[in-house]
Image (tube, rainbow, N blue to C red):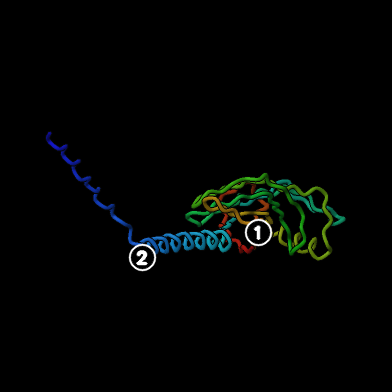
């Protein structure tokens, strides 16, 4: 009787390629560094954005009158341009108030609806501020009458807004933006916006 053949020896599968633990640690540290750097960049862009640019592009006045009792009535028309210089940060205007004044005495104001401004975009704001029988100080009334005889009055435009900044998924807290545009020379002898010299506003957060 022929003895049975022994079973063939089992072949062991080739050992799998093991990952180098040092290389894994290096890759993890590089990825972590990139994530931290990105988080710092997003935070910086959101908390320290570039200064917004505001200009008064045109101004005119209609129905301008100063009564004997030093009360003013007028319709001030302004064209204001807002520019967001950021490349990756958008601006949300939650509220805005535009007022006009003469020697720091406000004579008219208006609330502007909320809006969003995308990166590198301009927003044109056309607004009419109406003064209706607003009392002036003795000094301002006298000064405005003198300027009126020359055909041009010197006004100021003030902008106050509550804004927040957003980049990718991060939004900043709401902050107060203030802009002062002066002097704004308004022709009282013509209703047209033509011939006006643009005024660059000073802004701060």
Residue lying farthest left?
Answer: 2
State the SS at label 2.
Answer: helix
Residue lying farthest right?
Answer: 69
Give the residue at x 86% y 55%: 68
Could you tell me which quadrant the N terminus lies in? top left
| Pair 1/2: label in front | 2
Residue 38 or 51: which is nearer the viewer? 38
- Report the side of 13 relative to 46 (left or right): left
Give the residue at x 53% y 48%: 118
Image-quadrant location for residue 143: bottom right
Q: Which residue is mark 1?
A: 177
Which mark is drawn over residue 22? 2
Crowdedness near tag 2: few (<14), some (14–19) or many (≥20) residues, C-alpha within 10 Å: few
Residue 33 or 113: which is nearer the viewer? 33
Q: Is residue 103 above or below residue 124?
A: below
Q: Is residue 151 visible?
A: no
């Amino acid at each position: 009787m022929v003895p049975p053949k022994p079973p063939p020896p089992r072949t062991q599968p080739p050992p799998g390629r093991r990952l180098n633990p040092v290389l894994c640690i290096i890759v993890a540290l590089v990825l972590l560094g990139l994530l931290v750097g990105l988080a710092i960049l997003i935070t910086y862009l959101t908390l320290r954005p570039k200064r917004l640019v505001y200009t008064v592009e045109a101004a005119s006045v209609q129905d301008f009158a100063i009564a004997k009792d030093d009360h003013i009535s007028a319709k001030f028309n302004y064209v204001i341009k807002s520019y967001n210089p950021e490349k990756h940060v958008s601006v949300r205007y939650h509220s805005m108030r535009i007022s006009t004044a003469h020697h720091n005495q406000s004579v008219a104001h208006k609330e502007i609806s909320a809006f969003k401004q995308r990166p590198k975009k301009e927003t044109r704001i056309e607004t009419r501020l109406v003064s209706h029988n607003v009392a002036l100080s003795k000094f301002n009334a006298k000064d405005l009458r003198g300027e009126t005889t020359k055909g041009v009055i010197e006004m100021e435009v003030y902008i106050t807004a509550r804004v927040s900044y957003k980049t990718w998924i991060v939004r900043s807290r709401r902050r107060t933006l203030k802009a002062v545009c002066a002097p704004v020379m308004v022709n009282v002898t013509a209703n047209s916006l033509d011939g006006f010299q643009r005024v660059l506003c000073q802004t701060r957060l």
